[in-house]
Image (spheres, rainbow, N blue to C red):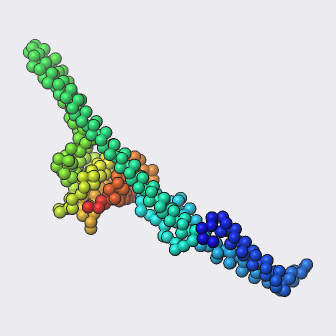
Amino acid sequence: MRGLPLYWKVVLTNGAVFLAGTLALALTPARVSEDVLASEAVVLAVGLTVMVVVDAWLLRSTLRPVDRVIREMETVDLVRPGRRLDQPPAGPGAQLVSGWNALLDRLEAERAEGSAKALAAQEAERHRIAQELHDEVGQSLTVVLLGLKRAEDQVPPELADVADDLALVRESARAGLDDVRRVARRLRPGVLEDLGLLSALAALASDFTALGRGHLTRTTSPGLPPLSPQAELVVYRVAQEALTNVARHAAATEVALSLTRVGDAVVLEVRDDGHGTPIDEPGSGVLGMRERAVLVGGTLAIDSVPGQGTTVRLAVPA
Ligand SMILES: Nc1ncnc2c1ncn2[C@@H]1O[C@H](COP(=O)(O)OP(=O)(O)O)[C@@H](O)[C@H]1O
Ligand SMILES: [Mg+2]
């Protein structure tokens, strides 16, 4: 039956069982009277049972993998890649399972490539916006600041009120310039490229502390294995999003950020003691963290217990 379509396999299997039953009736002395006798009923029941059992046994190897693949289709999640069905040794089920596994290989590869492109484009865009903020908005604000200072110096002493107003405006312009620099720094972690991951995390930690949304403790174990620049960027962005979420949603008092080595992996953990929520509907922040983790072959786990807080744990292979 090898190579036959599934439909014909089922038809032929059932046909063979029916044929056996028919031949048994035709060629053996077994007969059924008009009013079925008890002994005949027993023979019929035994015959029917044998046919059903043989049919089920023959169809089992063909159809069971179909059910497994259907169940798998309903639950598969490309954000958690690497799950595959065990390959049955032979039969149409084996073809189905190997086809399914090959389909997953292809989808996961395409997805990884797609999200790598999307994230690279996002980083490039952030880079560009940060540059423009710094070079253009930052420049214009600096010019405004200098102009205000010059104007202030030229105000005659009898117009002290005007000088005070100008000083206030200059203060606002300076605050605006600080905001622009801060936003640009968040968009493009220059400190990551210049000073490395640990300094970049320290900068994130002090940004978080400045928000006043909880007391942050930062621990990094010494002798961490080096990470690729891409993996460092992933660790940085996940820490950034996790801390932003703590500031926005957690209402925490204690927050712990740690970077440690576990076996061959570097593990980032952001733990808060806020109110925690079951994150049933991940927003773009949580999805982005997952996508990034997958991109560098890492894993991301978020553990949130209502009333006890949330832990975000990212492990990336060194
Ligand atoms: N540390 C946290 N504490 C409590 N709730 C959180 C925390 N992190 C995430 N959440 C919940 O998970 C949701 C999804 O987070 P996210 O995907 O980052 O979206 P966003 O931050 O844009 O709302 C949040 O809206 C929030 O309800
Ligand atoms: Mg968020």
Please tell me in which quadrant of the rendered image residue 50 appears.
Answer: bottom right
Along the line of sight, the residue nearer the viewer: 162 or 317: 317
Along the line of sight, the residue nearer the viewer: 67 or 95: 95
The answer to whether 308 appears left or right of 85 in the picture is: left
Q: Is 222 above or below relative to 136?
A: below
Question: At which x and y percent is residue 29?
Answer: 84, 86
Is residue 231 in view from this perspective? yes
Q: Is 68 above or below relative to 232?
A: below
Along the line of sight, the residue nearer the viewer: 254 or 100: 100
User: Hey, which residue is sitting farthest right in the picture?
Assistant: 34
Residue at x-position 51% and y-position 62%: 99
The answer to whether 245 appears left or right of 81 in the picture is: left
Please tell me in which quadrant of the rendered image residue 221 appears.
Answer: bottom left
Residue at x-position 63% and y-position 71%: 1
Residue at x-position 10% and y-position 16%: 154
Question: At which x and y percent is residue 109?
Answer: 41, 55
Q: Is 96 above or below relative to 46?
A: above
Question: At which x and y percent is residue 158?
Answer: 10, 13
Please tell me in which quadrant of the rendered image residue 33 appears.
Answer: bottom right
Quarter of the image with the C terminus in it: bottom left
Residue at x-position 42% and y-position 62%: 82
The answer to whether 75 appears left or right of 255 in the picture is: right
Q: Is 127 above or below relative to 94?
A: above
Is residue 179 in view from this perspective? no
Along the line of sight, the residue nearer the viewer: 237 or 304: 237
Q: How many numbered discs, if any?
A: 0
Question: At which x and y percent is residue 122?
Answer: 33, 43
